[in-house]
Amino acid sequence: AKDFPGAKYTIQVAPEDCTGCTLCARVCPAKDKSNPRHKALDMVPQMPLREQERINYDFFLSLPEVDRTKVKIDVKGSQFLQPLFEYSGACEGCGETPYVKLLTQLFGDRAMISNATGCSSIYGANLPTTPYCTNEDGRGPAWSNSLFEDNAEFGLGFRLAVDQTQIHAEHLLKQLSADVGDTLVSALLSADMGDEAGIAAQRERVVQLKATIQSIDSPEAKRLALIADYLVKKSVWAVGGDGWAYDIGYGGLDHVLGTGRDMNILVLDTGVYSNTGGQASKATPMAATAKFAMGGKSIEKKDLGLMAMAYGHVYVAQVAFGAKDRQTIQAFQEAESYPGPSLIIAYSHCIAHGYNMGDALDHQQAIVDSGAWPLYRFDPRRAVIGENPLKLDSKAPTIPFEKFAMTENRFRMLTKTDPERARELMVNAQRAIQVRFDVYKQLASLTINSGSTGESN
């Protein structure tokens, strides 16, 4: 591995947990120069290899994890980090789980996740097991499932509880400064935890603090020992599907965005109520068929991102890892670092879309190319320095929407049952896509004045 001198890089498949979706083999770029059909990852019959791969996998698990403080967090570097979400019970080729896995790789050892009922709660807690796990230090995501209608508020409760506990810990620390020492107290209270090195350094200081206060016989020291870990920054997330975020739980989501609190929201957008069988939601795109919209959805998809941007103080990103993985990584990092509410809307392919999930990454690219899923990041911090907060990360549509749509049964079905209506909706959908892109393009080109208001007359 170029970034790790003296080390070698390997990809090891878990032989008894592979679901056979073929996505990894299809996307693998490493080919044998003498035989281009042979790649670093090939799909082959499992049974003849299972016994040897069990041995290989056991050895692989015994290898030490990389030092997080030495990893450059980009597309390649992020995948050196240990996932704290593994072997879920999701459908093979699921489009939601890669985002959850990424979240745990980047922030999992200090993450607190409130999860709305839906697919992500089913594969997230298929008792008596859970795919969420811990690292060698025993740290991992704190996860809990809420109802459809109150998940955002549930997550906000996490945020408020963390904030109050941190404030209490800081108060006790100041009370004990004479015994603990001003140097350590000052370092704990002023710590920069903007990267992995800063987080690791703060954890070392907390260990030192705990050792110090063991010898202090006071109620304050005993209480601080119980909550000292809250001096390390927590990453709070509300996670759920579009049925929650666009529909049933939208009022709560809007309330959380309006509080201004440092809360991250990840919407796994499949465009339907996937867990209950593919019913239409406000996220269902125009012209698509779904349960309760078998005649094709006649109105546009709700633009949740644009509505959130209207607040001005909310970080908003729309991503599709299969189309632009680098932009997805950037969005997660920016959202987590933003000291306010953040919303990531993540395109998630689904079996309800009606095609082979092995082709899912091509479909993600195609929907972005059609303009039906524009990629962007809206960061209010840019406005403060006079830059436009909206950055478009995808180009103008390069293929007709119909070319993409006719590769998925959710759009193709209506052409069989009602061809005339299908043609009408497809024309309307193409028009709406172009209008929306033009709106975003104009918003992204506006000149921003970060200075004071003009002189009064």
Image (cartoon, helix red, strand yellow):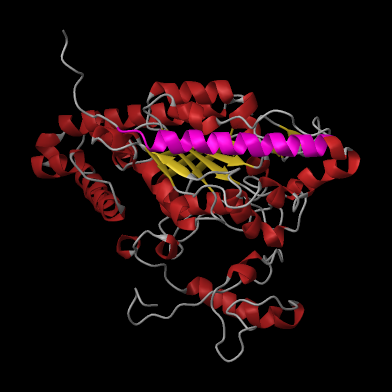
- Identify the image quadrant of residue 289: top right
Nearer to me, 193 or 285: 285
The quarter of the rendered structure image containing the N terminus is bottom left
Residue 256 as seen in the image, left or right of residue 169: right
Most distant residue in the top direction:
457
For the image, the number of numbered tags is 0
Relative image position of residue 414 (x, y in whole percent):
84, 40
**Image location of residue 169, percent across then percent down:** 27, 32
Residue that appears at 66% across and 46% down? 401
Residue at horizontal 55 percent and vertical 34 percent from the top:
436
Q: What secondary structure is the magenta-colored segment mainly? A: helix
Q: Using the image, determine if residue 150 lies above or below residue 202.
A: above
Residue 316 visible somewhere in the drawing:
no
Q: Which residues are magenta?
A: 421-447
Residue 327 magenta-drawn? Answer: no
- Percent of width and height locating residue 66: 38, 67
Of the 4 image quadrants, the one containing the C terminus is: top left
- Residue 444 falls within the magenta-colored stretch: yes
Residue 273 is left or right of residue 375, and the answer is right
